[in-house]
Protein backbone atom coordinates (compact mmCIF):
# COMPACT_ATOMS: atom_id res chain seq x y z
CA UNK A 1 0.00 0.00 0.00
CA UNK A 2 1.20 3.52 -0.78
CA UNK A 3 2.69 5.02 2.42
CA UNK A 4 1.08 8.39 1.69
CA UNK A 5 -2.32 6.68 1.45
CA UNK A 6 -1.70 4.88 4.74
CA UNK A 7 -0.65 8.12 6.39
CA UNK A 8 -3.69 9.95 5.08
CA UNK A 9 -6.04 7.28 6.44
CA UNK A 10 -4.63 7.56 9.94
CA UNK A 11 -4.02 11.32 10.20
CA UNK A 12 -6.18 14.31 9.36
CA UNK A 13 -4.77 17.00 7.06
CA UNK A 14 -4.29 19.29 10.07
CA UNK A 15 -2.39 16.59 11.96
CA UNK A 16 -0.14 15.96 8.96
CA UNK A 17 0.60 19.69 8.85
CA UNK A 18 1.33 19.59 12.58
CA UNK A 19 4.14 17.03 12.26
CA UNK A 20 5.32 18.48 8.95
CA UNK A 21 5.74 21.89 10.60
CA UNK A 22 7.69 20.43 13.52
CA UNK A 23 10.19 18.85 11.12
CA UNK A 24 10.54 22.04 9.09
CA UNK A 25 11.42 24.18 12.11
CA UNK A 26 13.42 21.64 14.11
CA UNK A 27 15.55 19.98 11.47
CA UNK A 28 17.65 22.77 9.83
CA UNK A 29 20.29 23.14 12.60
CA UNK A 30 20.14 19.55 13.87
CA UNK A 31 19.20 17.30 10.96
CA UNK A 32 20.38 19.47 8.09
CA UNK A 33 19.09 18.48 4.69
CA UNK A 34 16.04 16.77 6.16
CA UNK A 35 14.35 20.17 5.99
CA UNK A 36 14.90 20.22 2.22
CA UNK A 37 13.62 16.66 1.81
CA UNK A 38 10.62 17.39 4.02
CA UNK A 39 9.71 20.69 2.40
CA UNK A 40 10.06 19.47 -1.18
CA UNK A 41 8.27 16.18 -0.51
CA UNK A 42 5.47 18.11 1.16
CA UNK A 43 5.30 20.47 -1.79
CA UNK A 44 5.07 17.64 -4.31
CA UNK A 45 2.40 15.97 -2.20
CA UNK A 46 0.53 19.29 -2.15
CA UNK A 47 0.64 19.37 -5.95
CA UNK A 48 -1.06 15.98 -5.98
CA UNK A 49 -3.68 17.16 -3.49
CA UNK A 50 -4.38 20.25 -5.57
CA UNK A 51 -4.58 18.21 -8.77
CA UNK A 52 -7.09 15.83 -7.18
CA UNK A 53 -9.07 18.76 -5.72
CA UNK A 54 -8.46 17.76 -2.12
CA UNK A 55 -6.90 21.17 -1.60
CA UNK A 56 -7.53 24.58 -3.12
CA UNK A 57 -5.26 27.52 -3.71
CA UNK A 58 -5.28 30.12 -0.98
CA UNK A 59 -4.41 33.32 -2.78
CA UNK A 60 -3.68 36.31 -0.54
CA UNK A 61 -2.31 39.58 -1.86
CA UNK A 62 0.96 39.45 0.12
CA UNK A 63 1.52 35.84 -0.94
CA UNK A 64 0.73 36.68 -4.57
CA UNK A 65 3.21 39.55 -4.60
CA UNK A 66 5.95 37.29 -3.22
CA UNK A 67 5.05 34.57 -5.71
CA UNK A 68 5.46 36.99 -8.62
CA UNK A 69 8.91 38.04 -7.36
CA UNK A 70 10.04 34.45 -6.76
CA UNK A 71 8.82 33.27 -10.15
CA UNK A 72 10.45 36.29 -11.82
CA UNK A 73 13.79 35.24 -10.32
CA UNK A 74 13.36 31.67 -11.57
CA UNK A 75 12.37 32.94 -15.01
CA UNK A 76 15.43 35.20 -15.13
CA UNK A 77 17.72 32.25 -14.42
CA UNK A 78 16.14 30.19 -17.21
CA UNK A 79 16.19 33.15 -19.61
CA UNK A 80 19.91 33.63 -18.98
CA UNK A 81 20.61 30.07 -20.06
CA UNK A 82 18.44 30.49 -23.16
CA UNK A 83 20.25 33.67 -24.18
CA UNK A 84 23.65 32.00 -23.63
CA UNK A 85 22.59 28.87 -25.53
CA UNK A 86 23.19 26.54 -22.57
CA UNK A 87 19.61 25.59 -21.75
CA UNK A 88 20.02 21.87 -22.37
CA UNK A 89 23.26 21.66 -20.41
CA UNK A 90 21.81 23.66 -17.53
CA UNK A 91 18.62 21.63 -17.02
CA UNK A 92 20.00 19.69 -14.04
CA UNK A 93 21.07 22.96 -12.41
CA UNK A 94 17.48 24.18 -12.50
CA UNK A 95 16.32 21.43 -10.15
CA UNK A 96 16.96 23.53 -7.00
CA UNK A 97 14.55 26.13 -8.39
CA UNK A 98 11.73 23.66 -7.72
CA UNK A 99 11.97 24.61 -4.04
CA UNK A 100 11.08 28.20 -4.97
CA UNK A 101 8.38 27.21 -7.45
CA UNK A 102 6.61 25.30 -4.68
CA UNK A 103 6.09 28.53 -2.71
CA UNK A 104 2.39 29.22 -3.53
CA UNK A 105 1.51 25.53 -3.44
CA UNK A 106 3.01 24.94 -0.02
CA UNK A 107 1.47 28.19 1.21
CA UNK A 108 -1.99 26.96 0.26
CA UNK A 109 -1.52 23.69 2.12
CA UNK A 110 0.15 25.25 5.16
CA UNK A 111 -2.65 27.75 5.62
CA UNK A 112 -5.11 25.08 6.70
CA UNK A 113 -3.32 25.19 10.08
CA UNK A 114 -4.68 27.57 12.70
CA UNK A 115 -2.32 30.52 13.13
CA UNK A 116 -1.80 30.22 16.86
CA UNK A 117 -1.02 26.53 16.45
CA UNK A 118 1.58 27.17 13.75
CA UNK A 119 3.16 29.98 15.79
CA UNK A 120 3.54 27.71 18.82
CA UNK A 121 4.94 24.89 16.71
CA UNK A 122 7.54 27.25 15.25
CA UNK A 123 8.53 28.50 18.71
CA UNK A 124 8.71 25.14 20.48
CA UNK A 125 10.38 23.30 17.60
CA UNK A 126 12.96 26.10 17.42
CA UNK A 127 13.49 25.77 21.17
CA UNK A 128 14.39 22.11 20.75
CA UNK A 129 16.53 22.99 17.72
CA UNK A 130 18.59 25.50 19.73
CA UNK A 131 19.40 22.96 22.44
CA UNK A 132 20.22 20.34 19.81
CA UNK A 133 22.41 22.81 17.94
CA UNK A 134 24.43 23.59 21.07
CA UNK A 135 24.93 19.90 21.88
CA UNK A 136 26.25 19.26 18.37
CA UNK A 137 28.38 22.41 18.42
CA UNK A 138 30.06 21.47 21.72
CA UNK A 139 30.80 17.95 20.49
CA UNK A 140 32.19 19.12 17.16
CA UNK A 141 34.25 21.94 18.64
CA UNK A 142 35.76 20.21 21.66
CA UNK A 143 35.82 16.54 20.62
CA UNK A 144 36.41 16.84 16.88
CA UNK A 145 38.33 20.13 16.98
CA UNK A 146 36.45 21.67 14.05
CA UNK A 147 34.14 24.61 13.49
CA UNK A 148 30.61 23.70 14.53
CA UNK A 149 28.52 22.72 11.53
CA UNK A 150 25.66 20.91 13.29
CA UNK A 151 23.67 18.67 11.02
CA UNK A 152 24.06 21.05 8.10
CA UNK A 153 27.61 19.95 7.22
CA UNK A 154 28.63 23.57 6.68
CA UNK A 155 29.45 26.12 9.43
CA UNK A 156 27.93 29.09 7.60
CA UNK A 157 24.69 27.28 6.81
CA UNK A 158 24.53 25.94 10.37
CA UNK A 159 25.02 29.42 11.80
CA UNK A 160 22.36 30.91 9.53
CA UNK A 161 19.58 28.48 10.39
CA UNK A 162 20.53 28.44 14.09
CA UNK A 163 20.33 32.24 14.16
CA UNK A 164 16.78 31.98 12.83
CA UNK A 165 15.87 29.48 15.56
CA UNK A 166 17.33 31.81 18.17
CA UNK A 167 15.23 34.70 16.93
CA UNK A 168 12.03 32.64 16.99
CA UNK A 169 12.71 31.73 20.62
CA UNK A 170 13.36 35.37 21.47
CA UNK A 171 10.28 36.56 19.58
CA UNK A 172 8.17 33.90 21.24
CA UNK A 173 9.35 34.96 24.69
CA UNK A 174 8.72 38.68 24.09
CA UNK A 175 5.42 38.32 22.23
CA UNK A 176 3.70 36.36 24.98
CA UNK A 177 2.49 33.69 22.56
CA UNK A 178 4.27 31.00 24.55
CA UNK A 179 4.14 31.41 28.35
CA UNK A 180 7.30 29.45 29.15
CA UNK A 181 9.46 32.46 28.45
CA UNK A 182 12.31 31.38 30.73
CA UNK A 183 12.76 28.19 28.72
CA UNK A 184 12.71 30.19 25.49
CA UNK A 185 15.33 32.64 26.75
CA UNK A 186 17.55 29.75 27.85
CA UNK A 187 17.11 28.14 24.41
CA UNK A 188 17.97 31.42 22.68
CA UNK A 189 21.16 31.64 24.73
CA UNK A 190 22.05 28.05 23.83
CA UNK A 191 21.48 28.73 20.14
CA UNK A 192 23.48 31.95 20.24
CA UNK A 193 26.41 30.07 21.79
CA UNK A 194 26.14 27.47 19.03
CA UNK A 195 26.41 30.30 16.51
CA UNK A 196 29.58 31.46 18.24
CA UNK A 197 31.05 27.95 17.95
CA UNK A 198 30.28 27.99 14.21
CA UNK A 199 32.92 30.75 13.88
CA UNK A 200 30.78 32.38 11.17
CA UNK A 201 31.63 36.05 11.55
CA UNK A 202 28.88 37.49 9.37
CA UNK A 203 26.20 35.67 11.34
CA UNK A 204 27.80 36.99 14.51
CA UNK A 205 26.87 40.39 13.08
CA UNK A 206 23.36 39.23 12.14
CA UNK A 207 22.48 37.98 15.63
CA UNK A 208 22.54 41.37 17.46
CA UNK A 209 20.92 43.18 14.52
CA UNK A 210 18.04 40.71 14.34
CA UNK A 211 17.79 40.66 18.12
CA UNK A 212 17.38 44.42 18.29
CA UNK A 213 14.67 44.25 15.62
CA UNK A 214 12.79 41.60 17.62
CA UNK A 215 12.98 43.81 20.70
CA UNK A 216 11.76 46.88 18.79
CA UNK A 217 8.84 44.99 17.24
CA UNK A 218 7.64 43.96 20.70
CA UNK A 219 8.40 47.23 22.49
CA UNK A 220 4.71 48.19 22.66
CA UNK A 221 4.10 45.39 25.15
CA UNK A 222 6.51 46.91 27.64
CA UNK A 223 7.26 50.22 29.28
CA UNK A 224 10.35 52.20 28.33
CA UNK A 225 11.95 51.06 31.56
CA UNK A 226 11.33 47.42 30.69
CA UNK A 227 12.76 47.87 27.21
CA UNK A 228 15.88 49.44 28.69
CA UNK A 229 16.12 46.58 31.20
CA UNK A 230 15.83 44.03 28.39
CA UNK A 231 18.57 45.83 26.49
CA UNK A 232 20.88 45.72 29.51
CA UNK A 233 20.12 42.04 30.09
CA UNK A 234 20.83 41.39 26.41
CA UNK A 235 24.22 43.04 26.66
CA UNK A 236 25.07 41.04 29.79
CA UNK A 237 23.98 37.79 28.16
CA UNK A 238 26.03 38.64 25.06
CA UNK A 239 29.09 39.22 27.22
CA UNK A 240 28.60 35.90 29.01
CA UNK A 241 28.24 34.06 25.70
CA UNK A 242 31.29 35.87 24.33
CA UNK A 243 33.28 34.89 27.41
CA UNK A 244 32.34 31.21 27.05
CA UNK A 245 33.23 31.18 23.37
CA UNK A 246 36.14 33.60 23.71
CA UNK A 247 38.70 31.19 22.25
CA UNK A 248 36.66 30.95 19.04
CA UNK A 249 36.09 34.71 18.85
CA UNK A 250 39.75 35.52 19.47
CA UNK A 251 40.94 32.98 16.91
CA UNK A 252 38.55 34.21 14.21
CA UNK A 253 39.39 37.84 14.93
CA UNK A 254 43.11 37.09 14.68
CA UNK A 255 42.53 35.33 11.36
CA UNK A 256 40.62 38.34 10.02
CA UNK A 257 43.35 40.80 11.08
CA UNK A 258 46.05 38.54 9.67
CA UNK A 259 44.17 38.13 6.38
CA UNK A 260 43.65 41.90 6.14
CA UNK A 261 47.34 42.60 6.72
CA UNK A 262 48.36 39.97 4.15
CA UNK A 263 45.98 41.42 1.56
CA UNK A 264 47.00 45.04 2.04
CA UNK A 265 50.72 44.60 2.60
CA UNK A 266 51.50 41.76 0.22
CA UNK A 267 48.49 41.52 -2.09
CA UNK A 268 48.02 37.95 -0.84
CA UNK A 269 44.72 36.57 -2.17
CA UNK A 270 45.24 33.04 -0.87
CA UNK A 271 43.64 33.75 2.54
CA UNK A 272 39.92 33.49 3.31
CA UNK A 273 39.51 37.25 3.01
CA UNK A 274 41.78 37.47 0.00
CA UNK A 275 39.83 34.78 -1.84
CA UNK A 276 36.58 36.66 -1.25
CA UNK A 277 38.03 39.95 -2.46
CA UNK A 278 39.38 38.21 -5.56
CA UNK A 279 35.98 36.66 -6.30
CA UNK A 280 34.23 40.01 -5.84
CA UNK A 281 36.63 41.59 -8.34
CA UNK A 282 36.11 38.76 -10.82
CA UNK A 283 32.35 38.89 -10.33
CA UNK A 284 32.21 42.62 -10.97
CA UNK A 285 34.22 42.16 -14.16
CA UNK A 286 32.00 39.31 -15.33
CA UNK A 287 28.86 41.35 -14.66
CA UNK A 288 30.16 44.26 -16.73
CA UNK A 289 30.76 41.86 -19.63
CA UNK A 290 27.11 40.74 -19.74
CA UNK A 291 25.07 43.14 -17.60
CA UNK A 292 21.54 42.42 -18.86
CA UNK A 293 21.09 38.65 -19.08
CA UNK A 294 24.28 37.42 -17.42
CA UNK A 295 26.41 34.39 -18.26
CA UNK A 296 23.97 31.65 -17.26
CA UNK A 297 23.54 29.53 -14.17
CA UNK A 298 26.44 27.21 -14.99
CA UNK A 299 29.00 29.96 -15.60
CA UNK A 300 30.08 30.84 -12.05
CA UNK A 301 32.35 27.87 -11.40
CA UNK A 302 34.16 28.20 -14.73
CA UNK A 303 34.55 31.98 -14.44
CA UNK A 304 35.95 31.72 -10.91
CA UNK A 305 38.37 28.92 -11.72
CA UNK A 306 39.66 30.67 -14.84
CA UNK A 307 39.85 34.03 -13.08
CA UNK A 308 41.97 32.67 -10.24
CA UNK A 309 44.39 31.10 -12.73
CA UNK A 310 44.67 34.10 -15.02
CA UNK A 311 44.60 36.99 -12.54
CA UNK A 312 46.05 35.58 -9.33
CA UNK A 313 47.94 32.46 -10.29
CA UNK A 314 45.89 30.35 -7.89
CA UNK A 315 44.21 27.00 -8.35
CA UNK A 316 40.83 27.52 -6.68
CA UNK A 317 37.29 26.50 -7.51
CA UNK A 318 34.03 27.77 -6.02
CA UNK A 319 30.44 27.49 -7.16
CA UNK A 320 29.49 31.09 -6.24
CA UNK A 321 31.11 34.48 -5.72
CA UNK A 322 30.55 34.64 -1.94
CA UNK A 323 28.04 37.41 -2.38
CA UNK A 324 24.49 36.39 -3.15
CA UNK A 325 23.52 39.38 -5.25
CA UNK A 326 26.79 39.43 -7.17
CA UNK A 327 26.30 35.75 -8.00
CA UNK A 328 22.79 36.51 -9.28
CA UNK A 329 24.08 39.44 -11.35
CA UNK A 330 26.77 37.31 -12.96
CA UNK A 331 24.48 34.37 -13.67
CA UNK A 332 21.31 36.23 -14.69
CA UNK A 333 22.33 39.86 -15.11
CA UNK A 334 20.30 42.83 -13.93
CA UNK A 335 17.10 40.88 -14.48
CA UNK A 336 18.16 38.20 -12.03
CA UNK A 337 19.68 40.58 -9.51
CA UNK A 338 16.65 42.85 -9.41
CA UNK A 339 14.26 39.90 -9.22
CA UNK A 340 16.22 38.44 -6.30
CA UNK A 341 16.24 41.81 -4.52
CA UNK A 342 12.50 42.19 -5.09
CA UNK A 343 11.83 39.01 -3.10
CA UNK A 344 13.36 40.54 0.01
CA UNK A 345 11.92 44.02 -0.62
CA UNK A 346 8.38 42.68 -0.98
CA UNK A 347 8.79 40.44 2.06
CA UNK A 348 9.88 43.43 4.17
CA UNK A 349 7.08 45.59 2.79
CA UNK A 350 4.47 42.96 3.67
CA UNK A 351 5.87 42.61 7.18
CA UNK A 352 6.10 46.37 7.73
CA UNK A 353 2.48 46.84 6.68
CA UNK A 354 1.33 44.28 9.23
CA UNK A 355 3.40 45.87 11.98
CA UNK A 356 1.90 49.28 11.21
CA UNK A 357 -1.76 48.24 11.33
CA UNK A 358 -1.98 45.15 13.54
CA UNK A 359 -1.74 44.70 17.29
CA UNK A 360 -2.44 40.98 17.14
CA UNK A 361 0.55 39.15 18.70
CA UNK A 362 0.38 36.23 16.26
CA UNK A 363 0.32 38.49 13.22
CA UNK A 364 3.18 40.56 14.60
CA UNK A 365 5.08 37.34 15.33
CA UNK A 366 4.65 36.32 11.68
CA UNK A 367 5.94 39.68 10.50
CA UNK A 368 8.90 39.28 12.85
CA UNK A 369 9.67 35.89 11.30
CA UNK A 370 9.91 37.51 7.90
CA UNK A 371 12.09 40.38 9.12
CA UNK A 372 14.61 38.19 10.94
CA UNK A 373 14.83 35.89 7.93
CA UNK A 374 15.58 38.84 5.63
CA UNK A 375 18.15 40.31 8.04
CA UNK A 376 19.92 36.99 8.58
CA UNK A 377 20.02 35.98 4.93
CA UNK A 378 21.13 39.39 3.67
CA UNK A 379 23.83 39.77 6.31
CA UNK A 380 25.25 36.30 5.74
CA UNK A 381 24.79 36.56 1.98
CA UNK A 382 26.96 39.64 1.67
CA UNK A 383 30.12 37.57 2.19
CA UNK A 384 28.80 34.07 1.66
CA UNK A 385 25.92 32.21 0.09
CA UNK A 386 22.48 33.78 -0.03
CA UNK A 387 20.51 31.13 -1.87
CA UNK A 388 21.50 28.10 -3.90
CA UNK A 389 22.07 25.71 -0.99
CA UNK A 390 19.33 23.15 -0.38
CA UNK A 391 19.05 23.82 3.38
CA UNK A 392 19.10 27.60 2.99
CA UNK A 393 16.58 27.55 0.14
CA UNK A 394 14.12 25.31 1.98
CA UNK A 395 14.47 27.22 5.25
CA UNK A 396 13.95 30.55 3.49
CA UNK A 397 10.73 29.23 1.96
CA UNK A 398 9.58 27.89 5.33
CA UNK A 399 10.04 31.30 6.93
CA UNK A 400 8.56 33.31 4.07
CA UNK A 401 5.53 31.03 3.78
CA UNK A 402 4.75 30.67 7.47
CA UNK A 403 5.68 34.27 8.29
CA UNK A 404 3.55 35.72 5.48
CA UNK A 405 0.63 33.46 6.38
CA UNK A 406 0.77 34.34 10.08
CA UNK A 407 1.19 38.05 9.37
CA UNK A 408 -1.46 38.62 6.74
CA UNK A 409 -2.91 35.36 5.43
CA UNK A 410 -6.28 33.75 5.98
CA UNK A 411 -6.92 30.30 7.38
CA UNK A 412 -8.89 27.93 5.15
CA UNK A 413 -10.26 24.43 5.52
CA UNK A 414 -8.68 21.71 3.35
CA UNK A 415 -11.47 22.13 0.80
CA UNK A 416 -10.97 25.86 0.59
CA UNK A 417 -13.66 27.36 2.79
CA UNK A 418 -12.63 29.85 5.45
CA UNK A 419 -12.68 27.83 8.66
CA UNK A 420 -10.47 26.71 11.51
CA UNK A 421 -8.30 23.87 10.39
CA UNK A 422 -7.04 22.07 13.47
CA UNK A 423 -9.00 20.30 16.13
CA UNK A 424 -8.36 21.53 19.66
CA UNK A 425 -6.82 18.25 20.76
CA UNK A 426 -4.16 18.56 18.03
CA UNK A 427 -2.86 21.90 19.27
CA UNK A 428 0.38 22.06 21.23
CA UNK A 429 -0.15 22.74 24.91
CA UNK A 430 1.08 26.05 26.29
Image (cartoon, grey):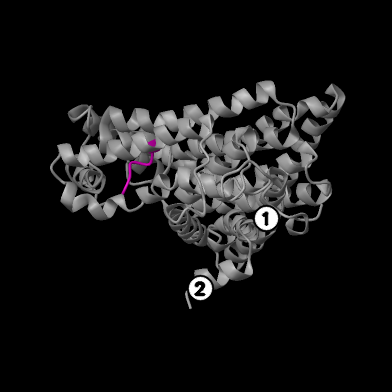
Report the side of 61 relative to 134 (left or right). Answer: left
Q: Identify which residue is drawn at 22% across, 50% down.
A: 90
The disc placed on residue 338 is none
Give whichever of 353, 383 is nearer the camera. Answer: 353
Residue 258's place in the image compared with 21, above or below, is above
**How far from the left and from the top, in percent, is residue 213?**
66, 30
Query: Counting other residues with Cα less than 10 Å from the Cα at mark 2, is it few (<14), some (14-19), or many (20 or more)?
Result: few
| Residues drawn in magenta | 319-324
Report the side of 341 relative to 42 (left or right). Answer: left
* Direction bottom: furthest residue: 1
Give whichever of 284, 62 is nearer the camera. Answer: 62
- The alpha-carbon separation of the residues under discs 1 and 2 comes to 25 Å
SS for dot 2: helix
Residue bearing mark 1: 125
**How far from the left and from the top, in percent, is residue 336?**
31, 33
Total numbered circles: 2
Residue 185 lies in the magenta stretch: no
Of helix, strand and loop, which mostly describes the magenta segment? loop
Residue 399 placement: quadrant: top right
Please indicate, yes or no, whether residue 257 appears anywhere in the rendered image. yes
Give whichever of 293, 419 is nearer the camera. Answer: 419
Lower position in the chain sequence, tag 1 or tag 2: 2
Residue 54's place in the image compared with 281, above or below, is below
Residue bearing mark 2: 3
Give whichever of 315, 159 is nearer the camera. Answer: 159
Amino acid sequence: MNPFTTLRRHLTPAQINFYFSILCFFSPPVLGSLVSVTFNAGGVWSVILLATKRRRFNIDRPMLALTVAIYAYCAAMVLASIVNGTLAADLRLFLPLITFLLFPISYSTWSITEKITLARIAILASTAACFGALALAIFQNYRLGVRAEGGAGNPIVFATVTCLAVMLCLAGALSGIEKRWKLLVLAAMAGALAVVYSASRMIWVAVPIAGIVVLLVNRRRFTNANVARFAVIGVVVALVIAAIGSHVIVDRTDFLVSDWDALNAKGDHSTALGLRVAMWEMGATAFREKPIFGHGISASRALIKQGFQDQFGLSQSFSHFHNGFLTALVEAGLLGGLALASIFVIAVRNAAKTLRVSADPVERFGATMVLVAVITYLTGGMAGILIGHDILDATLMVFLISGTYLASGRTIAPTGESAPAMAPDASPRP
